[in-house]
Image (spheres, rainbow, N blue to C red):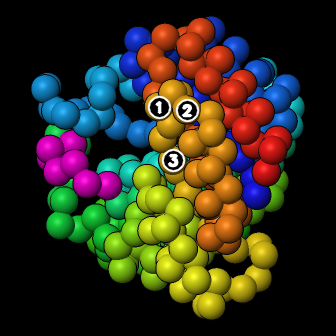
Amino acid sequence: MRIGVHLPQIGRKAGPEAIRRAAVQAEELGFADVWTSEHIIVPKGAPYPPSAIFYDPVLTLTWAAAYTRRVGLGTSVLVLPMRHPLPLAKELATLQNLSEGRLILGAGVGWLEAEFAALGVPFGERGRRMDEGIAMMRAVWSEDPVSFPARTIRAVIDNMRSLPHPVQPIPIWIGGSSEPALKRALRLDGWHGSRVSPQEAAPIVKRLRAARPEPEFVISVRSGWDGKDDKALAARLGGYREAGVGHVLIEPAERALDDWLAAVDRVARAAEKL
């Protein structure tokens, strides 16, 4: 089972030096990958996310990539329906090439209706925009010239060019545990569940593996950790492994950077015992 760690991208601990230190530490400790999340604009006083300080996920990964050589780079998750697929496809292809093929695109439909409204994107269209956006990006990443018959997203793409293509395909892992999310994941490269326990993950893993037994299809879970109990963390990681999860992203809860970095070191020690 591979282990990833969330970068300190959110809250007062976030910043260029914090992200650099965290990415370098994660690579030195042998983590499989480092991750970022996305919120562009949030209502004042909203209970979640915990802070309005939220660095852009793609630029944050680009900064991390510049200081590392091996560790993977993932988004947990990009809210694809909020973005127009064409500039996003260009950004992601550029990051994939600059990092020499280390990118994983975790993607979800989103849930914060006020954020969609602020961006002028119809909340009720997010499922259709998600599917069409993925198809559009994959066409742009693989065809030259490219034509794409957009229906929901406003775009006219007819015999056009967008280069360079990614140096290798960008895997797409779908976040969420809803029925549409699971079906969408099965059509793509992996599932990236969020805050599901090992017990909750087990039946989902069983279902996904029955449909996609090949090892290239990744089953991943994002799990928070309060940093208080190393034994509980080790037991949780062991539970995910027994459930058949192939990748776990740990998000430490510490708000101060030094405490966060220390928590990541403890995660690495717990992972070594698996």
Q: CA distance from mark 1 to mark 2?
A: 8 Å
Q: Neighbour class for label 2 at 10 Å: few (<14), some, many (≥20)? A: few
Q: Is residue 168 left or right of residue 105?
A: right
**Contact (CB < 8 A) between labels 1 and 2?**
yes
x, y percent for residue 273: 81, 44
Q: Is 116 on the left-hand or right-hand side of 102?
A: left
Instruction: Work out whether residue 98 or residue 153 is closer to the camera in this orientation and state it.
Output: 98
Range of residues picked out in magenta:
110-117
**Mark 2 or 3: the one toward you:** 2
The residue drawn where x is 75% and y is 43% is 271
Residue ID for mark 2: 229
Can you say whether 41 is above or below 11 in the image? Answer: below
Is 122 or 13 nearer to us in this picture?
13
Q: Is residue 264 magenta?
A: no
Q: Which mark is residue 57?
A: none
Dot 1: element: loop
Residue 171: percent from left, percent from top: 67, 62
At 48% across and 21% down in the image, what residue appears?
254
By secondary structure, the bulk of the magenta-drawn segment is best described as: helix
Q: Is residue 131 above or below residue 63?
A: below
